[in-house]
Image (spheres, helix red, strand yellow):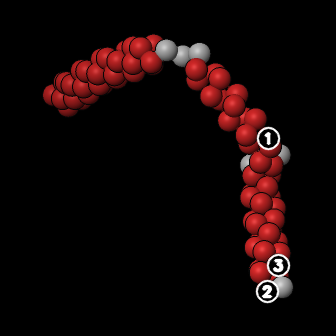
């Protein structure tokens, strides 16, 4: 009988936990575990449509753009300093 009581207590604890998980998911607009699993499937399918080489290409392009923007920012800072120094002299 003790094993049955223990099994019931464990089942109740799991049930309470799943209710808590569902409540927390609902706080973020997810309608429970079923909705989460469905969303995961959609995400996996969508991500499966992307080729790794496409992601690597986009990452490399973003890195090149970032480097170019950093160079432009440095040049603009130099121009700004030059302009400020010229205005002080006149």
* Residue 10 drawn above or below residue 24: below
* Residue under the image location 72 percent in, 35 percent down: 39
Secondary structure type for disc 1 = helix
- Quarter holding the C terminus is top left
Of callouts 3 and 1, the N-terminal one: 3
- Quarter holding the N terminus is bottom right
**Disc 1 from disc 2: Cα separation:** 37 Å
Name the spot of residue 80 as percent of width and height, x first. 27, 26
Along the viewing direction, whichever of 4 and 16 lies nearer the viewer: 4
Which of the two discs, 1 and 2, sits closer to the camera? Answer: 2
Name the spot of residue 30 as percent of width and height, x first. 78, 45
Of callouts 1 and 2, the N-terminal one: 2
Q: Residue 4's quadrant in the figure?
A: bottom right
Residue 21 visible in this rendered orientation of the protein: yes
Disc number for residue 35 = 1
Secondary structure type for disc 3 = helix
* Residue under the image location 41 percent in, 14 percent down: 53
Disc number for residue 4 = 3
Secondary structure type for disc 2 = helix
Disc number for residue 2 = 2
* Residue under the image location 49 percent in, 14 percent down: 51
**Disc 2 from disc 3: Cα separation:** 5 Å
Name the spot of residue 34 as percent of width and height, x first. 80, 43
Q: Are marks 2 and 3 in contact (CB under 8 Å)?
A: yes
Along the viewing direction, whichever of 56 and 74 lies nearer the viewer: 56
Residue 90 visible in this rendered orientation of the protein: no
């Amino acid at each position: 009988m003790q094993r049955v009581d223990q099994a019931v207590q464990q089942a109740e604890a799991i049930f309470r936990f799943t209710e808590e998980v569902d409540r927390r998911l609902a706080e973020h607009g997810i309608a429970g575990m079923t909705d989460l699993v469905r969303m995961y499937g959609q995400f996996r399918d969508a991500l499966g449509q992307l080729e790794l080489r496409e992601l690597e290409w986009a990452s490399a392009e973003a890195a090149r753009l970032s480097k170019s923007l950093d160079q432009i920012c440095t040049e603009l800072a130099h121009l700004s300093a030059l302009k400020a120094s010229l205005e002080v002299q006149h």
